[in-house]
């Protein structure tokens, strides 16, 4: 059961995001620490909320490790949180999203796993919320062992649609898609970097911490035979390049962090719903199936896999 207290946004956590209609369609998240007592923080500007623990105890390290899922309010992000919680008797999961108060799926999981799940408010288009999340995680846990960047946009009714021709491409669509699909995840990595470096593989069966960015097969330049989807396709291609570049730097610095990119397949979620008509039934995956496969890849990642791009079945995808 949650105990709620109204507090100004000056506490540990973030400023609550701008409530634009567009952002209602973004899948963005931020972690907060687990306890049986939760504080409800409100913004003086718009009354936004964020679930976070009011306890001052620190859960440094620990068996099972600390995992963060960014973009966890629905879709495969929410499924990552569920499976991570259900497969581990120990360890902690930090789920981040733009609007924790409206994340009913996460709230239900918090009630089921009160000691192992924290929910933080994070908007990938607002760097201050990313910084606040990193500070909150540092003070609560001291480190991270796994970061999954799952937030992304493909279409927004009356605002953004995948382009079928160059003539329909708009600057605003490119900028919005890049901000959410490319810039956001990379800024999350930037601010979580010290925590991942500190955590490495401690408390897990891996030798290193892992950053897993959710990409898409359509981002592959070598596999691009159909064209179209200019904004979404290129935003994920940019994400691939930046992730690869970061993986090279981590390796050069000998930081205990591996970076990989994952294609989940065509998954039955809100993101793919408008585009499922021509997808063969055996190629439309459930969230449960896709996430199970992706976690299998994450669990078995080795140093030789650093900077690589994998499909849900473990096959490497060409750049």
Image (spheres, helix red, strand yellow):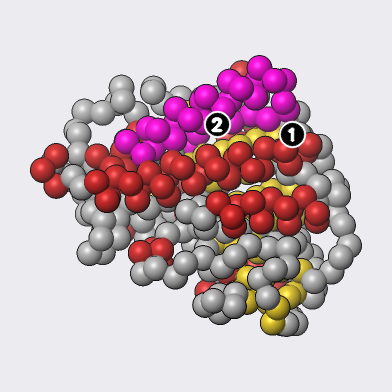
Does the magenta run of residues contain 257? yes
Nearer the observer, 187 or 221: 187
Residue 3 drawn at (x, y percent): 75, 82
Q: Residue at x 24, y 42 (%)?
A: 229
Density class for disc 2 (Cα within 10 Å; few <14, some 14-19, many ≥20) is many
The answer to whether residue 288 shows anywhere in this view is no
Question: Height in image: 25 above or below 263?
Answer: below
Residue 116 drawn at (x, y percent): 76, 61
How far apart are the alpha carbons under marks 2 and 1? Answer: 16 Å
Nearer the observer, 50 or 78: 50
**In-image side of 287 versus 6 (left or right):** left
Residue 216 drawn at (x, y percent): 39, 38
Disc on res. 197: 1
Q: Residue at x 47, y 67 (%)?
A: 18
**In-image side of 288 versus 200 (left or right):** left
Classify mark 1: helix, strand or loop. helix
Quadrant assignment for the C terminus: top left
Magenta segment's dominant SS is helix
Residue 43 image-quadrant placement:
bottom right
Q: Residue at x 75, y 74 (%)?
A: 38
Viewer-side label of 2, 1: 1
Disc on res. 260: 2
Residue 197 image-quadrant placement:
top right
Residue 156 image-quadrant placement:
bottom left
Nearer the observer, 144 or 115: 144
Residue 63 drawn at (x, y percent): 84, 46
Disc on res. 216: none
Question: Height in image: 105 above or below 311?
Answer: below
The answer to whether residue 59 shows anywhere in this view is yes
**In-image side of 294 versus 144 (left or right):** left
Q: Residue at x 51, y 65 (%)?
A: 17
Magenta segment, which residues? 234-262
């Amino acid at each position: 059961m949650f105990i709620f207290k109204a507090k100004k946004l000056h506490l540990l956590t973030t400023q609550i995001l701008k409530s634009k209609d567009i952002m209602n369609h973004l899948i963005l998240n931020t972690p907060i620490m687990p306890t049986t007592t939760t504080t409800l923080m409100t913004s003086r500007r718009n009354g936004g909320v964020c679930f976070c623990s009011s306890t001052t105890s620190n859960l440094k390290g620990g068996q099972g490790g600390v995992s963060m899922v960014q973009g966890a309010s629905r879709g495969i992000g929410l499924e990552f949180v569920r499976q991570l919680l259900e497969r581990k008797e120990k360890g902690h999961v930090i789920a981040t999203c733009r609007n924790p108060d409206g994340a009913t799926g996460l709230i239900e999981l918090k009630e089921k796993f009160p000691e192992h799940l924290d929910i933080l408010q994070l908007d990938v288009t607002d760097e201050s919320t990313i910084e606040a999340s990193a500070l909150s995680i540092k003070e609560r846990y001291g480190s991270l062992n796994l970061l999954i960047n799952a937030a992304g946009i493909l279409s927004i009714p009356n605002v953004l649609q995948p382009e079928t021709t160059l003539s329909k491409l708009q600057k605003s669509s490119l900028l919005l898609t890049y901000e959410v699909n490319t810039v956001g995840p990379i800024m999350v990595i930037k601010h979580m970097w010290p925590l991942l470096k500190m955590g490495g593989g401690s408390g897990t069966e891996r030798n290193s911490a892992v950053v897993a960015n959710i990409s898409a097969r359509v981002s592959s330049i070598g596999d691009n035979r159909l064209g179209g989807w200019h904004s979404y396709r290129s935003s994920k291609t940019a994400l691939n390049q930046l992730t690869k570049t970061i993986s090279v730097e981590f390796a050069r610095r000998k930081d205990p962090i591996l970076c990989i990119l994952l294609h989940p397949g065509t998954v039955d979620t809100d993101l793919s719903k408008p585009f499922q008509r021509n997808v063969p039934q055996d190629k439309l995956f459930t969230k449960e199936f896709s996430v199970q496969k992706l976690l299998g890849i994450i669990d078995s990642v080795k140093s030789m896999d650093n900077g690589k791009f994998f499909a849900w079945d473990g096959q490497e995808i060409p750049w």
